[in-house]
Image (cartoon, grey):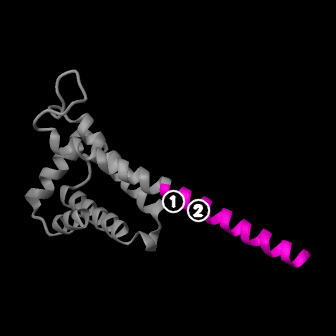
Amino acid sequence: MFILNAGLSKLQAEKDTHSRLHGFASGAYPVLENMPPEQFGKALGAAEIALGGALLAPVVVGDGLAGLALTSFAGGLVGLYLRTPGMRQEGSVRPSHDGTALAKDVWLAGIGLTLMASSVGSRRKAGQAKRRSRDTKAAKSGS
């Protein structure tokens, strides 16, 4: 719900907010420098809405895809943390006071990886059950 709400807020945000977000992100990811701030803010908001929706309804998109999306999003946030000056204590990956808000987002990566792993495990169990059922039917028809 939090990610969905963040996306909705970004779509309704003012130009100053988009400029601030764009400045922060383009400092860590220079490829974003040429993107207009308002376009960046709206694209980020739309991506967060899609991600938030996928996480609220994983039955629709599947655990694996929702997990992949969350892991990718978290990777961007962790990259922002690692690349932005002042977010970490000197010579360490430990967060500075200013970096704590971003550093805590590493848990999103853990949740995303767990969703992906759960998806693989679920598919494996479903495949085993299907094979057992097929084998049982074959054994009964062969008797």
Tell me the residue that label 1 is attached to. Answer: 119
Q: Which residues are magenta?
A: 118-143
Q: Quadrant of the N terminus?
A: bottom left
Q: Tell me residue 113's x, y (percent).
A: 42, 50
Q: Residue at x 34, y 64 (%)?
A: 51
- Badge 1: few (under 14), some or many (20 or more) residues near its Cα, within 10 Å? some
Quadrant in which residue 41 is drawn: bottom left
Q: Is residue 123 magenta?
A: yes
- Which residue sits furthest front? 143
Q: Is residue 58 magenta?
A: no
Report whether 128 appears left or right of 62: right
Callout 2: SS: helix
Circle on res. 133? none
Tell me the residue that label 2 is attached to. Answer: 123
- Badge 2: few (under 14), some or many (20 or more) residues near its Cα, within 10 Å? few
Q: Quadrant of the C terminus?
A: bottom right
Q: Is residue 136 above or below residue 37?
A: below
Q: Tell me residue 5's x, y (percent).
A: 20, 67
Q: The disc labelled 2 sits on which kind of residue?
A: Arg
Q: Tell me residue 97's x, y (percent).
A: 10, 36
